[in-house]
Image: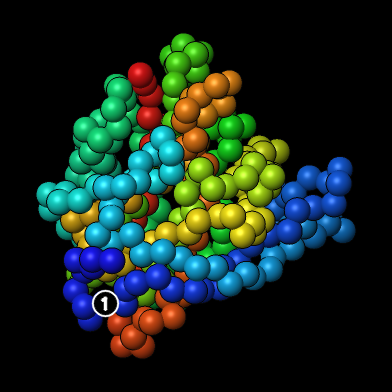
Amino acid sequence: MAISAPTAVAHGTVTAKLNFTRRPAEGQVAFNYVDAPPAGEPQNNLEKYQADVAITDIRGHESEYNLDRDAFQIIQDVPESKEKAFVDDESIKANYYPEVEKLLLDNIPGSNRIFLFDHTIRRADPNSSRKAVQSVHIDQTAYSAEKRVRSHMGEDAEKLLQGRYRIVNVWRPLNKTPLESMPLGFASSSTLDQHDVIPVEHRYPHGYIGQTAAIAYNPGQKWHYLSGMTGSERLLLECFDSESLKEGTTVDGGRVAHTAFEHPLTRPEHEGRESIEVRALVFGP
């Protein structure tokens, strides 16, 4: 397999331990309290376990994957961002958000409206409030995607819900050198069985309930990563696609399971991963 990333960067197919979740007992709802749980209740009822998973390096084959089949896509040769520091939220919104909006409109055929609703910066610094997530998950479900549209799109929501709507995360490293530490692994949606997907209620103190999905391991899942990812590359992660719910559709996207993982060939001296993910509602066609 051809590798275009620098040879000093850990690359190639590897086997790594990923953290999965067991399905709750029949009739039980998987849950997690965002803050302190009510008296007598656990923080969550999620039972984690590890599985050794082969993760294929797609370096050299980036163009072979797309959102409709795999729910992930690689965009390369992205111009340098106007945002340089990625430390101030308002500066990120002013400089980086417009670039992300254009990227999505240019690379998702038929898309005609984008709404960016938040972003997260993750750093390896021990003092960082957000670090790489090492648990296999999907950020949104059909339930939470609809709630997002209703929450963010106001009086246009009902009309937009009648058409195609998606939630796509735009992920990139912020490191100055090709990424080696804690890369992102992602499973092709076409290999993810619906039985593997475990809806998880996220219960907030004020009564709001959000929903993500944990993932149970299935040997049929096909896992991938992109070695030596740089700041001129973007990884699109499709968390939901309303088209995939239609009967007879050929779209299998909209549920990309993903997780950070410890690459077994990462050099000890390599800098820790820094990254930003921007979450977007994508409408059309």
Kindly identify the amino acid type of the residue bearing the numbered disc 1: Val
Quarter of the image for the C terminus: give it: top left
In the rendered structure, the answer to whether residue 246 lies left or right of residue 92 reads right
In the rendered structure, the answer to whether residue 262 lies left or right of residue 78 reads right
Q: Tell me the element at label 1.
A: loop
| Figure colour scheme | rainbow
Towards the viewer: 81 or 51: 51
Q: Is residue 130 visible?
A: no
The furthest residue to the front: 1
The furthest residue to the bottom: 268
Give the x, y percent position of residue 195. Answer: 69, 45
Q: Is residue 24 visible?
A: yes
In the rendered structure, the answer to whether residue 163 lies left or right of residue 36 reads left
Towards the viewer: 135 or 277: 135
Picture layout, residue 185 above or below residue 255: below
Residue at the location (87% across, 58% down)? 40
Number of callouts in the render? 1
Picture layout, residue 209 above or below residue 89: above
Residue at the location (52% across, 51% down)? 257
Q: Quadrant of residue 269?
A: bottom left
Residue at the location (33% across, 51% down)? 235
Give the x, y percent position of residue 115. Answer: 36, 30
Quarter of the image for the N terminus: give it: bottom left
Picture layout, residue 256 above or below residue 283: below
Residue at the location (36% across, 64% down)? 57
Q: Neighbour class for label 1 at 10 Å: few (<14), some, many (≥20)?
A: some
Give the x, y percent position of residue 217. Answer: 64, 59
Q: Which residue is mark 1?
A: 9
